Image: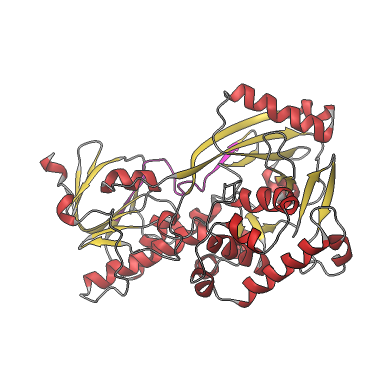
Amino acid sequence: MSNLDAVIVGAGLAGICCARALAKEGVSFQLIEASDSVGGRVRTERVDGFLLDRGFQVLLTAYPEALAQLDYDRLQLCAFAPGAMVRCDGRFYRIPDPWREPGTFMTSLFSPVGGLADKFRLSRIRSSVVSRTIEEIFDGEDISTMQALRRRQISQAMIDRFFKPFIGGVMLDPKLTVSNRLFEFVFKMFAEGDAAVPAEGIQAIPRQLAETLPAGTIRFNERVHSIGRNQVKLSTGEILQAKHVVVATEGPEASRLLGFERTVSSRSVCTLYFAAKEAPVEEPMLVLSGSSRGPINNLAVMNVVAPGYAPAGENLVSITVLGWPSRDDQTVVSMVRGQLRHWYGLVADEWRLLRMYRIEHGLPVVSPMEWQQQSRLAPGLYVCGDHRSTPSMQGAMESGRLTGESVIREMRGQPDPVTRVRKDEPRLSEIKDPDQE
């Protein structure tokens, strides 16, 4: 038993940022994490000298919350080159970003990835999102990205060759059913900043955030069995008493613990890492599959972007396959190798598979798409995460911070400025005490 001001369940970005907000005000808390490290989905594993992020992940440096909470210099961020390399019609085409790379306008204008009209319409989309605030973007119409692109008269060829692999890859949604609000927000972030990774892997982000937390406030390898009114029951049977409970897990686990009638759905992704003696791409640029043939959505040579991702004399090739492949792992690897052989020749057969990650809960499915949903479900009970905001690092970090601030307001008897509650969320009376089970 214990008597804390707060217990936070989950040490991902949301849980850490919630804890940081509480720590600044001297609030006592315990952060309970089921795994052996911080980060949640934002994890990095070292294998044979390579840094393998669990899923291809980048930090968009224009994220407002990241700018406020992270020290970019200490992270030693390494940026991807703006634009992309697109594979279509049997060859690769370099598609630069003419706004970020002056002098490349004509190259971009006459590339075969979309017609001239598409390029001008893309320019208008960019101008539109850059000129509006994030709040104004989220006040826009909540229609699908595909609907919005068709309304803007973007050709089907441009959608298939660029938007599906690029935006669909970012949001793990190749059909572009995700809200146009999220598309415009992400497009704005790409336009205003870089896509980058820390020199020591993506998990350097949550590690840096957690550095400021008081010693002993995080408990690892502790799974939560259930939560109740002002209580958290661990799988060991231990019960933690707290005035406030914050559930900061990924969406499906939050649904289980809180008893939501509607389970938070997730988009899945599969990432494969290969070691190669020669880099198939010499620029720090994302490679997109502009064809529906083959499982690969995008490819990147990580050490060309950030040299520390691979040991000397080696290259780390990251490959993303969207969704949850129905085939077994060996078949998926064989299919990926077949597509790589078609792209790069027989040398791809020599690449050594390091790891294959199937990530069931890559990103939450959020509908309707809103900037923030209320974190306070009932007195003393909160939930946060990117499933309550934008499915992104920005959404997770901001949701966590705002939840911490909401807890502090409740402790001080101050009103919470956000009052909207979804119908499928539980009332406090519906949450059982763990010791009554």
Q: Main secondary structure of the magenta part?
A: loop
Q: Is residue 331 above or below residue 40?
A: above
Q: Work out whether residue 210 or residue 323 is closer to the camera in this orientation and state it.
A: 323
Residue 425: quarter of image: bottom left
How many numbered tags mark residues here? 0
- Point 45% across, 66% down: residue: 371
Q: Which residues are magenta?
A: 30-46
Q: Position of residue 204 (x, y in %)?
A: 55, 53
- Point 18% across, 56% down: residue: 428
Q: Is residue 408 magenta?
A: no
- Point 36% across, 53% down: residue: 248
Can the viewer see residue 89?
yes
Q: Position of residue 242 (x, y in %)?
A: 20, 56
Q: Work out whether residue 38 or residue 122 is closer to the camera in this orientation and state it.
A: 122
Image quarter where the C terminus lies is top left
Q: Position of residue 278 (x, y in %)?
A: 82, 37
Q: Work out whether residue 171 or residue 18 is closer to the camera in this orientation and state it.
A: 171
Q: Is residue 324 above or below residue 178?
A: above
Can the viewer see residue 26?
no
Asked which colour scheme the image uses, the reply is secondary structure
Residue 406: quarter of image: bottom left
Left/right of residue 175 with respect to residue 39 in the rendered view: right
Left/right of residue 168 with respect to residue 382 in the rendered view: right
Q: Is residue 301 above or below residue 106?
A: above
Q: Position of residue 132 (x, y in %)?
A: 59, 76
- Point 20% across, 37% down: residue: 237
Q: Is residue 45 magenta?
A: yes
Left/right of residue 83 with respect to residue 357 in the rendered view: right
Left/right of residue 297 with respect to residue 225 in the rendered view: right
